[in-house]
Image: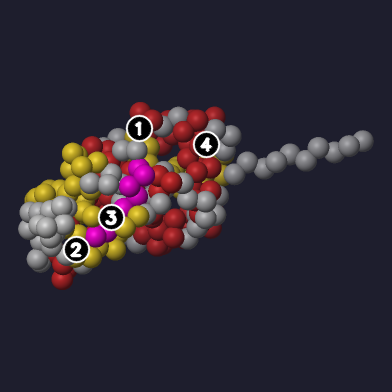
Amino acid sequence: MVMTQVKEKKVIAIVDDDKELAEITAWDVEAAGYEPSLLFDGNFTDVNQMASFIIQGFQGAVCDHRLSNSGLANFYGAELVATLYNAKFPSILVTQFTETDISFSIRKWRRNIPVLLSREETSALSIAQGIEDCTSELAGKIPSTRKPRRTIVRIASIDEESNTSVIDAFIPSWNPHKAVRFPASLIPEYIRVTLKPNTRLFAYVNTGADKSDDLYFENFELAPEPDEDDGLA
């Protein structure tokens, strides 16, 4: 008699302080072929502590972005996913506040968030694909939409949003006609204090991204002033 080995399902942590939303996500995770485990209760004050708890007990995670409304954590899901990414642990970030949160509380960590889904995009198919994409990137297979390239970033304006200093800038090699907002804190302070409209910087940006929500910025440098005689000013 031939024994058939049953493949054990990977257990995916559903990190969400809203039990109802966590249960909806769990249905999608189960339909994707994983075993969901809800994590909606607790009081985590340290992101590394929570990341360690997840890594020790699960094989993947789907995290909501806003985790503090019911006291589950005093940090954002974006920071948690980025921390898990640094530990080579596959996780997906889900949010129903993409338009309001992307420019600062998500963009700050976007470099280490391979998969960001809005609530309306979240399904069994997108979760299965997201876990696969994240696992692939952690293994070193970075898609062209996520690869950083050194490029010019031109400052359009410096503003305040939710008591956070933010910058609107153009990335001509991505889209010369659409400004993108990101936290000023991504830029080193010695550069930040010199910024004004039309300042040009070099930065590493994933200019292959299809939409602005997927853009990340790192390793800023001051760019030389354009030469009016070189045709590029």
Helix, strand or loop at label 3? It is strand
Q: Is residue 23 above or below residue 184?
A: above
- Label 3 vs 4, first from the N-terminus: 4
* 2 vs 4, front mark: 2
- Label 3 vs 2, first from the N-terminus: 3
| Residue 24, image x, y percentages | 42, 30
| Residue 180, image x, y percentages | 20, 45
Q: Which stretch appears magenta? A: 202-209
- Circles 2 and 4: CB atoms closer than 8 Å: no
Label 2, label 1: how far apart the Cα atoms are = 39 Å
Which residue has dot 1 on it?
Answer: 119
* 2 vs 1, front mark: 2
Which residue has dot 4 on it?
Answer: 128
- State the residue in front, 123 or 231: 231
Q: Is residue 127 above or below residue 149?
A: above
Which residue has dot 3 on it?
Answer: 151
- Label 2 vs 4, first from the N-terminus: 4
Label 4, label 1: how far apart the Cα atoms are = 15 Å
- State the residue in front, 162 or 149: 149
Residue 204 belongs to the span the image colors magenta? yes
Q: Amino acid at mark 1?
A: Arg
Q: Residues within 10 Å of mark 2 (few under 14, many from 20)?
A: some
Q: Quadrant of the N terminus?
A: top right
Q: Residues within 10 Å of mark 3 (few under 14, many from 20)?
A: some
- Label 1 vs 3, first from the N-terminus: 1
